[in-house]
Image: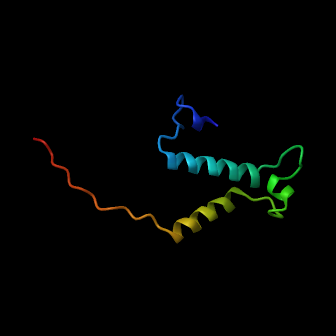
Amino acid sequence: MRRFTRLTNGFSKKVEAHANAVALHFMHYNFVRIHATLRMTPAMAAGVTDKRWEIADIVALIEAKEAENPMVRGPYKKRMVAA
């Protein structure tokens, strides 16, 4: 994963963004990607799920979580413009 190195534009500058990217990677790796040796996803092999997930399923989870706890931004501070 190129998120760990600073050589690309994909480098995560914030810890929260990095945690989200790593979580998305592991979700895809375990629930979406069919592994050659298992011939199924690791989640299916472990008995966590009985179907192969799609990216749309992961997006639906993210949207449901965002609708549950909408991000509230704080008030903006007015800047003094130096003339």
Residue in the picture at 58% in, 38% down: 3
Report x, y in % for residue 36.
87, 43
Pick out the residue farthest to the bottom. Answer: 68
Image side of residue 15 versus residue 53, left or right: left
The quarter of the displayed image where residue 18 is located: top right
Residue in the picture at 68% in, 56% down: 55
Report x, y in % for residue 53.
75, 59
- Above or below, comparing residue 10 to residue 63 in the picture: above
The quarter of the displayed image where residue 64 is located: bottom right
Residue in the picture at 84% in, 64% down: 50
Q: Quadrant of the N terminus?
A: top right
- Residue 32 in sight: no
Report x, y in % for residue 27.
69, 53
- Residue 19 in sight: yes
Pick whichever, 14 or 9, lies toward us: 14
Q: Quadrant of the C terminus?
A: top left
Report x, y in % for residue 25.
66, 47
- Above or below, comparing residue 9 to residue 25 in the picture: above
Pick out the residue farthest to the left. Answer: 83
Residue in the picture at 15% in, 46% down: 81
Q: How is the image coloured?
A: rainbow
Pick out the residue farthest to the top. Answer: 7
The tally of labels here is: 0
Image side of residue 61 versus residue 66, left or right: right
Image side of residue 59 versus residue 12, left or right: right
